[in-house]
Amino acid sequence: MGETVITVSNVRRVYKTEVGLFKKTKKEVEALKGISFSINRGEIFGLLGPNGAGKTTMIKLLTTMLIPDEGTISIMGMDPVTQHRKVRPHINFILGGERNLYWRLSAYDNLAYFADLYKVPRLEQKNRILELLELVGLGDVAHQRVETFSKGMKQRLQIARGLINRPDILFLDEPSIGLDPVSARRLRDILLKLNEQGTTILLTTHYMYEADELCDRIAFIDKGQLITVDTPKNMKRQTAGLSIIECKLTNVNANKMEALSLLPHVRHVKQEQDDMLTTIRLHTEMPQAVIPAIYQLVDETNISDLAIMQPTLEDVYVQLVGGHAK
């Protein structure tokens, strides 16, 4: 992992729009504010941030779909602005959801169509298509129409489509969005296998556990600015001294929840609701002080489970990007 294949230097991108129904005024939205990072050959690199952070804009710049207003980008030593025709055979991209597939065609015919677009020699097409369908677990439905596929099967076909030109670099924009846990697990296994074969991967995702499992390094961006770039392991070290109290509660009203978030020594609270069960995660450096306070606020019969846990990558994200509870 020594050779750098992507270099982004002080890249800025501004969208210009008009707002107003009758009296229109021009407005500029700065999607990227001078971002710089690099990606090494054979790396899985994660680009993480909230909606509107600039992740998709960055993907479009790297895949020659947009031009930066300022700064430079290098893809395998080539400029994607002036040398886009040379860059494109070396890259491919996959979007989340069910776009970029023709539902009335079979899986095989979809890949044959894209093989023609990427000028894959006809003599090579059949073997490559069948090989890719086997890789993504769709070999037995090669000649079945895509409209009959589940969401997970469609997304695996997207992976095959993205590999039709044997790209050196694969860009994935939220590939597991909307997938069930089994399909998402299969997708991650495919990506790890591709990476073992030497494919460099840039991944955007909202799922922190997915990024933690897959990525060699991660960049957090927020409001068009780079917050940090590091390995997941090193990022979690930044939470040294922080503990997470995970508490599962039943029949707890909003006033009690607000009181829990205002407890001394609590830095952040995340809440999830599942029917009658509420799960809260409290970030604190003093769990020994916070736990008795929880029992004072909440009737013991309403606490179905309570545990002290180590911080996850999601907790790091909350700390660096998600703001504070108070």
Image (tube, rainbow, N blue to C red):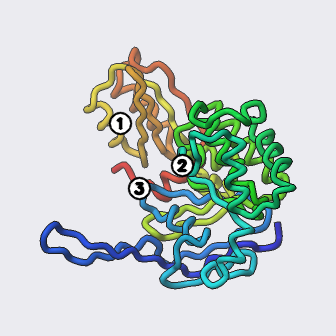
Q: Look at the numbered discs 3 and 2 and tell me whether their residues touch, using CB distance below 8 Å.
A: no
Three-letter code, disc 2: Arg
Three-letter code, disc 3: Gly
Neighbour class for label 3 at 10 Å: few (<14), some, many (≥20)? Answer: few
| Residue 242 is at least partly visible in this image | no
In terms of sequence position, does the residue under pointer 3 or pointer 2 come before the other? 2
Give the mark toward the camera: 1 or 2.
2
Residue occupying the point 43% across, 55% down: 51
Q: Look at the numbered discs 3 and 1 and tell me whether their residues touch, using CB distance below 8 Å.
A: no
Label 3 to label 2: alpha-carbon separation: 33 Å
Q: Is residue 290 above or below residue 314?
A: above
Residue occupying the point 60% across, 81% down: 81
Three-letter code, disc 1: Leu
Q: Is residue 316 above or below residue 78?
A: above
Read off the residue under disc 3: 323
Q: Position of residue 174 (x, y in %)?
A: 56, 50
Q: Is residue 134 left or right of residue 162?
A: right
Read off the residue under disc 2: 99
Read off the residue under disc 1: 260
Q: Is residue 293 left or right of residue 5?
A: left
Give the numbered dot on residue 84. Answer: none
Q: Which residue in the rendered view is the most extreme toward the left?
A: 22
Q: Which residue in the rendered view is the most extreme toward the front?
A: 122
The local secondary structure at tag 3 comes to loop
